[in-house]
Image (spheres, helix red, strand yellow):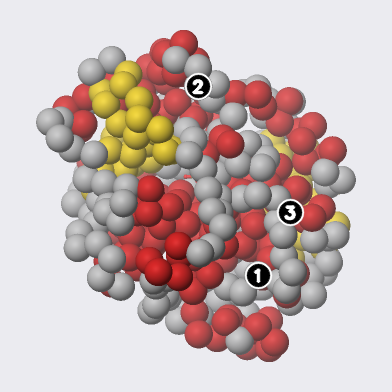
């Protein structure tokens, strides 16, 4: 793990000094950023506008006069579904309709401060929309690589933002390969929600917001969908930082949920393994988390283990049922975004007596898919 937190904060020379503009570190490992050593004080928070950048002590600097698209600051609302009582964090109220805006806003703010004017990303949908929107905001050219098999409705959004959409036949891994080959052969920045460590600096604000919304406490557990782990790893980092800063005294348990048809992390977890072998890419309606070989798989296992958490699976029919139940309560989410609710319908014991549980509603049903 590279300690970049101090070096990237001195923005002027960070591109050459820190180097996470390269896809991998020199030794082939993935970039990670050290945890922040400071925290925002409750007093300074009181006077700041609600939204992602109120946690500026623990974030890279936003460009001067940055306004943004209104990222962060999503509502937390109590919800009872079947026998499960929890708080739903309504992430689909983000600017492009998913929590990926948290990561894209921070990652592209950093890239803009480096003078990047062209970026590329591969995604099954929501990350492409988020990166395309923030690339448009910062005036960057953007190339997005998506699987041909994905919901066509998800391609409209990045192309409306002006991105060039490349549809790639093959697996999700083939799509990533195509994007990386494109980056190697051009001057584009790889704005990857998986590889770029700054993305997780954005998604960690998910934890900071929950902490504030619960009145300065951590919940007992957070139930999160997991494919590549952009929310799991970000949330884990945020709560770790809050604990290190003395804002909370224990980490919430992370219950990470995979689709049964594509569950390499759940398999590794069941076997008690510390590494993820990868699996065959099974078909699932939860296309947003169908990742057969997550590049940060081992990191995800460690993050869940550190919280005394667990990794479980849900079937497609359970996810569809949860999505329908959410919709009947007024919450319109895309199929993948019903994964955590499906897990709680299956395991209401996770919300037992007096326990506080937070579940993200990750993506909007208006996108289709
Ligand atoms: C990105 C995403 C996820 C999960 O993210 P991973 O980084 O693959 O773990 C879950 N739901 C939705 C709707 C998403 O867009």
Q: Taking 136 as reference, is 335 left or right? A: left
The residue singled out by tag 2 in the image is: 331
Residue shown at the point (38%, 62%) measured from the top left: 237
- Element type at mark 1: loop
User: Which mark is nearer the camera, 2 or 3?
Assistant: 2
One can see residue 84 in this view: yes
- Above or below, 159 against 4 in this view is above
CA neighbours of label 3 inside 10 A, class few (<14), some (14 to 19), many (20+):
many
Nearer to the camera, 355 or 145: 355
| Badge 3 residue CB within 8 Å of ligand 1 | no
Q: What is the distance, in whole Å, between disc 2 and disc 1 at their CAs?
A: 32 Å
The residue singled out by tag 1 in the image is: 62
CA neighbours of label 2 inside 10 A, class few (<14), some (14 to 19), many (20+):
some
The circle on residue 135 is none
Q: Report x, y in % for residue 262.
A: 43, 33
Q: What is the distance, in whole Å, between disc 1 and disc 3 at their CAs?
A: 13 Å
The residue singled out by tag 3 in the image is: 134
- Above or below, 186 against 332 in this view is below
Q: Taking 288 as reference, is 41 left or right? A: left
Nearer to the camera, 119 or 177: 119
């Amino acid at each position: 793990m590279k300690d970049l937190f101090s070096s990237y904060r001195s923005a002027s020379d960070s591109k050459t000094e820190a180097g996470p503009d390269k896809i991998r570190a020199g030794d082939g490992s993935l970039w990670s950023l050290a945890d922040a050593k400071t925290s925002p004080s409750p007093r300074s928070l009181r006077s700041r506008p609600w939204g992602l950048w109120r946690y500026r002590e623990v974030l890279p600097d936003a460009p001067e006069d940055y306004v943004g698209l209104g990222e962060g600051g999503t509502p937390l609302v109590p919800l009872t579904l079947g026998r499960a009582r929890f708080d739903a964090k309504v992430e689909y109220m983000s600017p492009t309709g998913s929590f990926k805006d948290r990561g894209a806003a921070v990652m592209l703010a950093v890239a803009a401060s480096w003078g990047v004017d062209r970026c590329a990303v591969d995604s099954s949908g929501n990350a492409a929309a988020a990166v395309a929107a923030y690339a448009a905001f910062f005036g960057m050219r953007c190339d997005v690589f998506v699987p041909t098999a994905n919901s066509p409705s998800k391609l409209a959004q990045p192309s409306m933002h002006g991105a060039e959409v490349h549809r790639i036949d093959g697996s999700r891994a083939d799509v990533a390969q195509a994007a990386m080959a494109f980056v190697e052969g051009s001057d584009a920045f790889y704005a990857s929600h998986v590889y770029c460590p700054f993305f997780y600096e954005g998604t960690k604000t998910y934890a900071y917001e929950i902490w504030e919304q619960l009145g300065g406490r951590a919940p007992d557990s957070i139930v999160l969908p997991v494919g590549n782990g952009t929310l799991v790893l970000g949330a884990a980092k945020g709560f770790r930082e809050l604990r290190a800063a003395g804002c909370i005294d224990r980490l919430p348990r992370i219950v990470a949920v995979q689709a049964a048809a594509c569950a390499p992390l759940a398999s590794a977890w069941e076997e008690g393994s510390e590494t993820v072998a990868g699996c065959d890419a099974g078909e699932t309606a939860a296309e947003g988390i169908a990742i057969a070989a997550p590049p940060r798989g081992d990191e995800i296992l460690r993050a869940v283990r550190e919280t005394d958490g667990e990794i479980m699976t849900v079937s497609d029919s359970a996810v569809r049922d949860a999505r329908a139940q959410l919709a009947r309560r007024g919450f319109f989410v895309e199929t993948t975004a019903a994964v955590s609710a499906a897990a709680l319908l299956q395991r209401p014991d996770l919300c037992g007596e007096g326990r506080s549980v937070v579940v993200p509603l990750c993506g909007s049903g208006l996108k289709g898919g």
